[in-house]
Amino acid sequence: MKVTIDNKVVEVAPGTTVYDAAKQIGIDIPKLCYMNLEAVGFKNHPAGCRICVVEIAGRKTLAPSCVSLCSEGMVIKTNSPRVLNARKTVLELILSDHPKDCLICPKSGRCELQDLSVQLGIREIHSVENAEMSTYRRDMSPSIIRDMDKCVMCRRCETACNVIQTVGALNAVNRGFMAVVAPAFENDLINSPCTFCGQCVAVCPTGALTEVDQTQKVIRALVDPSKTVVVQTAPAVRAALGEEFGFEPGTLVTGKMTAALKEMGFDYVFDTDFAADLTIMEEGTELLGRISKFLAGDKNVKLPILTSCCPAWVNFFEHNYPDMLDVPSTARSPQQMFGAVAKTYLADKLGVKREDLVVVSIMPCLAKKYECQRNEFKVNGNPDVDFALSTRELAHLIREANINFKALADAEFDHPMGASTGAAVIFGTTGGVIEAAVRTAYEVFTGKKLEKVDFQELRGLEGIRMATVDFNGTPINIGIAHQLGNARKLLDGIRSGQYNFHAIEIMACPGGCIGGGGQPLHHGNSDIIKARHDAIYREDREKPIRKSHENPYIQKLYEEFLGEPLSEKAHHLLHTHYFDKSK
């Protein structure tokens, strides 16, 4: 069908919205609540803000372009005086009830409301007398801050939380100027089903939802002469950090990131990938133990084993699947394994007291902030990991330190906890954890050398994937899911007997850690997620060692300190247990 938009004729398919039709011919209609989440195959278009209104010939009222469908011969104006006046009036009403602390707002410089105000030329607010200034308290959790005075009711967070992640922690409440999106229980994230995945933060256009910023605490530790400060960096960070400094998505900046951290004064710069290799040793041994018992006829063995690296996923099954708490691997996440080893093995080597060793994590995930504060990961109140910074926070810290990131020469990680394999790198993307486990489990199970380490059948960006890997005649059924909505489908299928897996990998965020809530904002752009995904596998291919059990520093750790996988010491330091949070 053909429609005319601003005197330009465009041919569109049936079911095309006016907004998408305009975009086809290069007309970008202003928007606020609308968001095309390509990476998860979903669009947020509640038509609530009315910023995207257009004038359609023959209609008395203006129409929201994000939900209005094109029809044959339709004539549309996106820039008539009536349209422009309506957009400005709506935006002025939104701004009339919005805090004016832009200079110190965490979203300053990347606030979509601020950008929209500039685009529409808002320089004064005419309707302040109509506004009722809200007085919502700020909701502080270990990971996320809610400042509901800045909520514009776009409901993007509600879509991310309830539709895509199926967590159900956020709901719209009240009407008019007092309308906000709030937690489902007690108006408090801590007492809600929130998993702290941070996808709500990633889509919020204003400062209503932001991460808990711990950069100043890290700076104070760096300047404290009594503290030895070490930092670990997750694999997904290196594939996305460069975007904050003008690099193309998918550019690996491992060396520059390491150099920046050293220039900021960290005593040692290590790699979480070291702990990812350690995770495979523990989780892989656990997997093989369960499978061996199952094949021997043990009907009580708990299968499928579920990976436990993602703290948002752990929170999700603790809230929603309390009857399955004995199914996931008891292995801690790489972040927590690193912290536990750093504050025992490394502290002893450095001659530093536990309480004087500060462990900082650079993570793509906001749930990591919550994870390191869980009581089971503390010794006498001292956490194994003291502070977790997001990728975005690291970028802020680099800028604050006045470091020219692009001009940095590459630097190497420190040893012993900076050496890793390609298997550890791929932890950063969906399917990577289970592929890393398979590389090691195959050789241990069969006693044969694995020549082909690339398991293409475990890769991809589909929300749910299933594959069978041949362990020399023994078929191992594997399920993979990313995003919690897909995780729910997979686990419900296990409950009902629909699926028969030996092992399942689940990650909470789109694409896995590469799409984490603490990464540079991708706004649902599938191309950015794909570029980061490809970068992870590119680094894997370039590693001289690609199997976790062949990491010589991991071998030395077991020889000198842990004994063997699943030993009493390893179980004490590297494993955990789970809690029923269904109430």
Image (cartoon, rainbow, N blue to C red):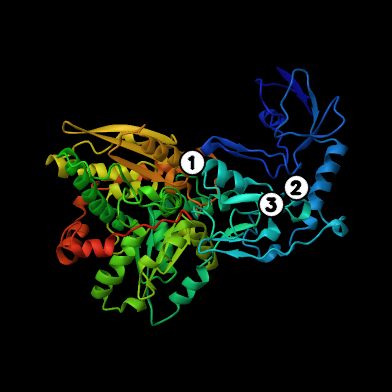
- Which secondary structure lies at badge 1? helix
Identity, as a three-letter code, of the amino acid under mark 2: Gln
Identity, as a three-letter code, of the amino acid under mark 1: Gly
- Which secondary structure lies at badge 2? helix
Q: Position of residue 130 (x, y in %)?
A: 86, 56
Residue at the far bottom in the pictured view: 226
Q: Earlier in the sequence, mark 1 or mark 3?
A: 3
Residue sitting at x 82%, y 34%: 62
- Report how far apart the C-alphas of labels 1 and 2 lie in the structure: 36 Å
In this image, 180 relative to 465: left or right?
Answer: right
Q: Nearer the viewer, mark 1 or mark 3?
A: 3
- Residue at the disc numbered 1: 485
Q: Earlier in the sequence, mark 2 or mark 3?
A: 2
Question: Crowding at label 2, few (<14), some or many (≥20) Cα neighbours within 10 Å?
Answer: few
Q: Position of residue 182 (x, y in %)?
A: 63, 55
In this image, 173 relative to 546: left or right?
Answer: right
Instruction: From the viewer's side, name the closer residue of 229 and 205.
Output: 205
- Residue at the disc numbered 3: 173
